Structures are given as C-alpha cells and as structure tokens.
Image (tube, coloured by chain):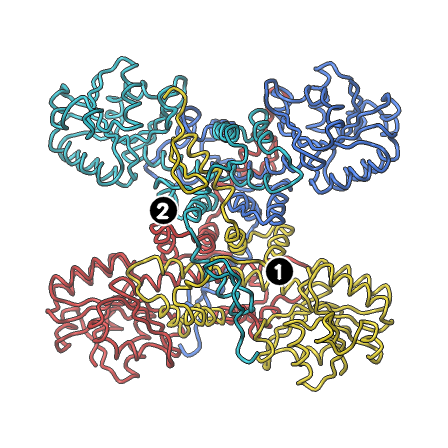
Chain colours: A cyan, B blue, C red, D yellow
Amino acid sequence: MELGLIGLGKMGGNMRERIRQAGHTVVGYDRNPDLADVGSLKELVETLSAPRVVWIMVPAGAPTQSTVDELGDLLSPGDLVIDGGNSRWTDDKRHAEQLAFKGIGFVDAGVSGGVWGLQNGYALMVGGKAEDVAKVQPIFDALKPAGDYGFVHAGSAGAGHFAKMVHNGIEYAMMQAYAEGWELLEAVPEVTDVHEVFRSWKEGTVIRSWLLDLAVNALDDDEHLEALRGYADDSGEGRWTVEAAIDHAVPLPAITASLFARFSSRQEDSPAMKMIAALRNQFGGHAVTDASGHTAKEHKAPGN
Amino acid sequence: MELGLIGLGKMGGNMRERIRQAGHTVVGYDRNPDLADVGSLKELVETLSAPRVVWIMVPAGAPTQSTVDELGDLLSPGDLVIDGGNSRWTDDKRHAEQLAFKGIGFVDAGVSGGVWGLQNGYALMVGGKAEDVAKVQPIFDALKPAGDYGFVHAGSAGAGHFAKMVHNGIEYAMMQAYAEGWELLEAVPEVTDVHEVFRSWKEGTVIRSWLLDLAVNALDDDEHLEALRGYADDSGEGRWTVEAAIDHAVPLPAITASLFARFSSRQEDSPAMKMIAALRNQFGGHAVTDASGHTAKEHKAPGN
Amino acid sequence: MELGLIGLGKMGGNMRERIRQAGHTVVGYDRNPDLADVGSLKELVETLSAPRVVWIMVPAGAPTQSTVDELGDLLSPGDLVIDGGNSRWTDDKRHAEQLAFKGIGFVDAGVSGGVWGLQNGYALMVGGKAEDVAKVQPIFDALKPAGDYGFVHAGSAGAGHFAKMVHNGIEYAMMQAYAEGWELLEAVPEVTDVHEVFRSWKEGTVIRSWLLDLAVNALDDDEHLEALRGYADDSGEGRWTVEAAIDHAVPLPAITASLFARFSSRQEDSPAMKMIAALRNQFGGHAVTDASGHTAKEHKAPGN
Amino acid sequence: MELGLIGLGKMGGNMRERIRQAGHTVVGYDRNPDLADVGSLKELVETLSAPRVVWIMVPAGAPTQSTVDELGDLLSPGDLVIDGGNSRWTDDKRHAEQLAFKGIGFVDAGVSGGVWGLQNGYALMVGGKAEDVAKVQPIFDALKPAGDYGFVHAGSAGAGHFAKMVHNGIEYAMMQAYAEGWELLEAVPEVTDVHEVFRSWKEGTVIRSWLLDLAVNALDDDEHLEALRGYADDSGEGRWTVEAAIDHAVPLPAITASLFARFSSRQEDSPAMKMIAALRNQFGGHAVTDASGHTAKEHKAPGN
C-alpha cells in the first residue's frame, strides 16, 4: 500500500526503510530536504492517491500539533492520520475529534524498538476505531517483529499511546531494578566479579530479559562503567505515567522512585538536602559542609 | 562424580533428578524416609567415598545450621560442604570458618530456577575458594542451563548467596514494575484489552523478559486475575537485600518499595493509616470510617 | 471594611464570624438560604458599595469557576475578587486574566486552620499584585492568628494557592512520619505504652509539633485507634503537589510515598499485588491465596 | 542524690551542669582529664557511695560495650547502670543480662534535646524494670523539661532506645517533608519569597512545629541556603529504624525515602544512575554524558 510518512529522523528514517523492504510505497517528508522525498506537506498529500494514509513521526507537543493542524487542512474526508510519535495520550483524543470534524480518521500508535527496530521490528500499540486500524494493518504488519507478538489494538483513541506510556514506565522501574542491584553488588568487597554475575544471569534466572542482555553488553564495554556519569534524562513518558496514576489513584511506588532517581541524577546539588543539612546544624550542632566542600564551624545554640 | 544431597523437597528432589540425568551418583537424605536414599546423615557420610562432597538443600536458618554442625562432626578433613539453600550470606562466612577449623571446605551456592529448573537448568551463583569450587564443578555443570550462561563464581565465601540475594531483590522490583503497569492499564477505560497489551509486549519491546512471559501465562488463565487475592509473602532475600544496602549506604528505592508493597499486602488493615485517619479527623473534622466500615460522626473542635 | 463572602459552609461560616468579630461588615451568600444574608449573587453585589471586595469560599473546580464567571458579569472595574477556596494554582492565573480583562482585580488565598481557625486564626498564603493584596489587608488581618506569623504575600497570582498546596504536601509527609513511627512502636512487644511515648514527646523533643499534639489527643480517646479503619481520603492538594514536582523535575519521595499510602488505604484489594501473587505462583509454585481467602492449589510447571 | 557520669562531651557536659543545677551531686569521668572530676572509672566508683548509680554517656558500640564490661567488674550487687548514649536497642537486652548476672541493675535511656537541652531540658525515653527506673527518677526529673511531658518509661530493657530510635526515624521524615516542600517552592518563579512563606507557617498552620521554627532560623541566616552543600550524614538511628521495620514487616516508605535521600546526598556520582545511562545508551542510542561532563558519541546499534 501507499503511505505518507512525516518525520525522517532516526526513528522515522529506519521505519521508512523497513516499510519499503516489505514492498510498500512510502512518500517521506522531513524539514531536512536531504532526507525528504517531497518538498512540502502539500506535495506529500498531492502525491498520495485517495483515500490517503499519513503517518506522523515528529516530536510530541507543538511539532505534532502543527502537523495535525496542517494535515487537517490538506487532507480530505476518508483520509486517515496516524500519530506514531511520543504524544501524550490525552492529546490523541483531541486530535481524533479535531480530524473527525473534517471526516478524517485518526489512529495513535506507540512505537517501541529504538535503534534495534530496523532489524528486529518495532513493537506497536495502537488506539482508534477498528475500521481505521484495519486500513493501516499492512503497514503495522510490515513494522512489527516477525512472530505472534509485537502488535496490539489496545482500545479507543489514546489507548495506543497510553499502553506505550505504561510500557515506558515499566521500563523505568526495570532499569532501576538492575541499576540498584548492580550498585549494591559493586559495593561489597566479597563479590569480586560483578560483570560475570550479570553475565551469568542471562540464562536460567528469573530476571533474564532483553534489558539484562543490554546491561551485560554495556559491562562488556566498560566493566565498572567508569567512562559514564550517573546522569539520566527522561523522555516525558515516565512523568505522564505517574500523572496518569495520580489521576486514577493508583499507587506506583517503584516507577515513581525510578523517575525521581532520574530527577536527582540531574541535580548538581540537592536543594532539599541543603535544608536537611541546615536543620541538622540548627538542632544538633552537627558540622555542615559548606558550598566549597569545607567543614564549617558549628552553629551554637543560644546560651551555650 | 559422587554427591551427597541433604534435603529432597521440591527443589532438592528435582536437582537430584537433573544431576542423575547427567550421569552422576547422588546419595540423597531427607527427614521424610519416602524421599530418602539413606536413613541418616551418618549413613549418607558412610556411603560416600572420601574426599566427600555434600550438598545441603534445607531451609535457611536453624535447619541449615544444625546440618552444618552435624556434618562438621561426621565429615573428615579434605571433605567439602556446599550450602545450596537460601541462607543469608552473613551465615556463610561463619559456616566457612567453622568447617575450615576442621579442615573441611565450604562453598555457598545461590540457586535460581524454581519449578522450571529440572527441565531448563538452574542458574548458580557460587562463593568460596577457587580450589573448592573446582571440586564441585561437574555438579554445577550438570545443574546449570545449557549454553554459556547460568553459572558464576562470584567471589569468596558468601558471595554466591549475596549475588542470589541481589538477584531476588532485582526480581522483586521487576515484578513490581509489571504489577504497577498492569494495575494502571486496568484502571483506564480507554484501554479495553490489557491482556492483549501484555501479550503484545513479548516481542520487539524494551521490557520483554521471562517474567513478562509468565505474566502473560497468568493472564491467559485468568484475564483480570479475579481468582487471586493481592497478597504476597516474601522469602527473606528481599529483606536481606535492603539490609545489605543499608549497611553499605546504598539507596535502593525501587527494590525497597517493592518489599514494602508486599508487607502492606499482608495487612488486614494498616495501623499507620489509622493514625492518618485519626489526625485528619482531629484537625479537619474530616469524616472517619470506623472499624465496621460506617462513616462515623465527626469530631468537633472545642469551641465549635 | 465591607466584604462580600460567597460560601458559608464549615470554613466560610466560621470565617464570617471571625471577620465580624474584628468589626468588619460581611455580606454572606450561600446556596442554602438558611445560611445566607442575601438571596443571590446579584443581591450581594448590589448590597456592597463600590469598589467592592468579594471573597469566594466554595469548592474548587466547577463551583469556583462558575462563581468567577458570574462575578465577572456582575462586578465593575475597580472591584476585586479573592479566591480563598482550595483551587488548583494553575486555575488562578486563568481567573486573574479573565477578570483583569474586565478591569477587576484578583487575589488567591490559601487558607489553613480547619475547625480550629475560628478561635486560633487562619494561616493565609496569598498571591496577586501588591496593590490588590493591600485592599484586602484589613480582612487578612482579621482572619490571621494573633502575633507575627500566619500571613504571607507569597508572590504573583497563583502563588498563594501554590504555597498552600505545598503546605498540604508537607502535611501529608509529616502525618505519614508519625503514622509510620506509631505503627512500628505498636509492633514491638518490648514497648508497652506507645500512648505514653507519644505523650512524652510533646516537650523537649525534636519532633514536637501541633500535629503531634493532635496525635496524642487521638490516642487519649482511643489508645490503639481500634475504632478506626486505616482509610484516608485525599483532598487534591497532595496530588497537585506531586504533579507540580514532576513539572519541575523536583524529586519528592517522602511526600509521594505519603500520597500513595492513602491511595492504597482505599483499595479493598491491590490489583498490583494480585499480579505479584500470580507471578510468584508462575515461577515458584508458591501457594496463592484465592479471592475467598483460601490457599489455592499450586500451579505446576510443565514436566513436574 | 549522687550520680556517676561517664562521658562529658557536648551532651554529657551539659547534662552534668543541668543535673547539678537541680541540686544533685555528679561525679564525672571523661578520657579528657580537662573535663573529668576523677582520674579513672575505678576512682569514680570508689568516690560514689553504695548503692551506686552510674550513667554512661559515651558513643554507641565499642566504647559503650567496654564501659559496660568495666563497670560490670567494678560495681557491686545492688548498683545500677544507665546507658544514655545512642546504643542500638538490641544491645540493651544483652547489657541488661550481662549486668543482671552480677546483680547490677540496668536502665536504657534515649535522650533527645541536642544543644538546646541544657536550657530547655532533655526528653527522656527509658526502658527497664520499674524498680530500677524508680531509683534514677530524681535524675530523670532534673534532666527532663519543665511541665508534664518529656519523660516516659516506655517498657522493658531496650524500650527506651527503641522509642528514641523511632523518634529519630520520625524526625528524618519530618525534616525530609520540609526539605521537599522548600525545594519545590524554590523551583517555581511565581513564588517570590519562600523565606517569608516558611516564616508565615509558624502560626495557624497544620505544619507548625519546632523543626519548622529551626528551618525559619536557618533561612533567616541564609535565605537560599547558598552557603551549604546538600550533604547529610546519618547517625545510625534512621538505619536501625528501617531495619526494625523490616524485622516486623512494617512498611515505612516515607522514613526509608528520607534515609535513602541522605545516602544519595553523600555520593559524588550515583553508580545506579551510571547503569541507567548505560542502558539508555544501549537501547535507544541516547547521548550519554561521560565522566568529564562531555556529551559522548552515541552508541550505534549493529546494522545501523
């Protein structure tokens, strides 16, 4: 089938290649003319035959919103838009309504796979009406991994990005689980080969997983991860997961702890712990460490 | 080679079978005569030729301690004891010293695999002196999964159980990760098929794992887990993991959250939350729910 | 001075009394005619002399929004609206702009004090322009506690409710701190009089506080809180605090733990812990407890 | 009455002064002869008339143990030892038995008050037999704050230090509560005067407390705590609180989060977060920050 694909970055570019390898026609647009097949969204829409199917693969938020807006103007009733980016699931409902008003269908697709997706396939979690999902199924089949898994129609508009968001929340906590275990093993002198411990876990254990395999790969390169700083960004989906949990009064302690660990990793110094240090000094006369790293004179309580 | 095996319960019995399938001789002892090959520890020791290798597979704590004590009396210099149970790693050092005093070697082995170990092999994490580990290697090779993984000599005495303990700590947090994600997905009406979402994750995702496969198996049996209560025991290793982290000043927020979630799951009612309810009532005149489930009369502040 | 006061429930009614005791004129409106001084918002506005000052004390969300909308129509340029309810701080900016468009001033006021406020005074945290805050200062002075504290102009529109929101977040974690300590003390047989331990803490300790005094009051009534269920609602501000923290990448582990403890307290059974139980059963053949509380038959792994 | 006091550091020295101000006789010993009234423990024991009461105020662990051992040799049946240091409560039972074997009584006393104790009094939580506690009551009365609070006989041997330990655990979480709230307020541009917000909370709020007063004192000195580093030691009691909770399967999420925040504050870099960074790089080609702070080249998945 024929697909318009907007956004040909790391993810979008590889997806175009995988879809083409499956025998479909992809007309790609990107702001970077070196990557694009056409020069504008208008040209992309004109190149496709109706009913058109256009996949958006641009950053979440304003870029996706403006693309949806523009497509709403360019496309015709009966056409279909897929948002395969990392949009917040609450945006999907709005986009679905906005496009439905013009007779245009909408499907949201959470896409997992990262840099490995081109060769292994992309896991897809999609939301939308069954008849809309069916129209894109050949593309989904091209993108998904071989085998029985890696694709789900999770529910109505937004359900795809919601499922992908939860996937990422789970991912945060799984990564944190391995990271905490690794730190603890590294802290104990009796355990002399943490790298080999991790490697041994790849078979026969309860905790074997693809993430564990990646951890072993990383330790193969740098046994004590000495070349790295303990600094981790977050992509938004972990935050949204916690916010969704709060909306539904679902306790999420491990996932939230993992998110907060990332926040902390990005702080040069912790304001909260400054307050702890200040309080300890006030009530106990505990030594404090000043901003230059020197141990400061102790506070004296009145009367002492 | 020849092995004495003490403890022929669910784990020990299957291990005996797997070791025998590899062509080794196992003399098994259990308090239950229906399971045992010999009638006593003394008989087990007499049946084996020196230098003897005896594997203990009994519950941690007092049963393991009394077995180590008894073996210390029965065995001879040059013999070797393996503790393959779930002993706390701090016990291993004591046992190693106790036996070394009599010229008997000691190896601790953390064993993972559960009911799947007989067919898939058991992951083994061992601690002790290299020459002692080498003496048991044929048995380790028989027990471990096929392939390059599933066995590690992690360090000195205690390192095997320490690595297994951390494995279980990681396991707690991974299980909690999936559990939190599942609860959140179930809470949202837009996601209409959580079971299929989980199934789809088996390929192409970052969170694919053996535990995920098990989760899908469980949902295959009971889509909303309606037949289960949200009640989870803990086997001790999660607690020890947190205690070891505290000893080494290692922050372990996700693993600890997972442990506490299990503690909470076993409380009929939360004493702490009674205090929260009492305080809310005191300062805000918030309605409280009494022990019988009825909303009680509000506390009135003096002067109102 | 003259004040219009909308909403004469538990809080609003007491506040009217305290303001009147200070010698000001309050014209109160409530949907309940038994509480109201006037029959409608229109009548309230007509009764006041310009420039009018009107304090909204109704539930956050839709009720506050519709009151702001209505006042926007009824009031005149130069008049001033105060939102003293529990509005989310992000609403304040919108309300400020909406009213500013009509020349009407806006101040947000977070109010603490609960049922004790009438006699002890209400702590007030306000946001808005300095000239608007100045117009209401006599009312603030009437409401606040005697002494040097209990009132702050925290910043621009929204800052008052933001400060009050954070106050409540801190409150959650302080309550949780006492609650956790109480539960632990109650769990240990060596400590025979937890009630007296709490009482003793009222002087000379680092943790003495008004909340501790309330905890002692509660234990005076019911030493082991046996009449209460461990069930706690949350009023919204705890959730908003965590959401604001996520927006600003501020780690908030203790406050969030306190919020999640409340969520958990309201669950009959934990869906997440059902998944934990299911997983334990899958990999370990651990006994599970079924929904009726009986220990169920163990799952058998294939081949056993 | 007459008291032997061993350990005349910051706490012990002030306590000696407060006890003397109440009219009692204190014979003090310290390793530092400038502080001591007598030259040795032996001389201290000889100076006191039987039945003697000796208060130990030295660091927990080895110093306390060796003092108990030495007193066990020097004292006579009918004498009494009080451990007022920060001993772990599990040590108290052992000390009580060790001394009881020689006919010597034992009382454990948790002491709160810090540098403010001399003027305000020390809160005391004591454990032991009622008849032993009664023998020291005049000293307890001298040390405790004026008024009805600040002293409790909490239970049998160990209960005093247990109650003090829990006091400190609560203290950790209360400090964390204020610290988190402060950090969040500081993060938001709309709130222009966080110092004044904290000051305003001193009256009329739910969260007013002595610790809040101290926080305000600290902010009076240094509005944004710019002179401090976010670094906090822990004195042991927070760790023991979590360990006691684990022993009794009591979930303690807020207190534990507070302890872990201190652990994190002392890490130059987080090993766990290095692993998170490594994993993100492996699966997503996310940029990593190397140990020197530079953004490193991205890892390329095979096939790209």
For the residue pair A120 and B296, the one nearer the viewer reads as: A120
Question: Helix, strand or loop at disc 1?
Answer: helix
- In the displayed structure, A247 sits above or below C148; it is above
Q: List the residue tagged with mark 1.
A: C186
Q: Residue D104: x and y, percent? A: 83, 69
Q: Which mark is residue B183?
A: none
Q: Quadrant of residue A47?
A: top left
**Three-letter amino acid code at the position of disc 1:** Glu
Question: For this view, does D30 lie left or right of residue D200?
Answer: right
Taking the image as drawn, is residue C246 in sight? Answer: yes
Residue in the image at 21% along x and 24% along y: A34
Can you name the residue that lies furthest to the bottom here? D23
For the residue pair C226 and D37, the one nearer the viewer reads as: D37
Q: Residue B99: x and y, percent? A: 82, 36
- In the displayed structure, B39 sits above or below A19; it is below
Question: Helix, strand or loop at disc 2?
Answer: helix
Question: For this view, does A134 lie left or right of residue B156?
Answer: left
Q: What quarter of the picture does the N terminus of chain B occupy?
A: top right
Q: The disc numbered 1 marks a residue on which chain?
A: C
Q: Quadrant of residue A38?
A: top left
Q: The disc numbered 2 marks a residue on which chain?
A: A
**Three-letter amino acid code at the position of disc 2:** Glu
Taking the image as drawn, is residue B294 in sight? Answer: no
Q: List the residue tagged with mark 2.
A: A243
Q: Rounded to the nearest whole Å, what is the CA distance between mark 2 and mark 1?
A: 34 Å
Question: For this view, does D83 lie left or right of residue C241?
Answer: right
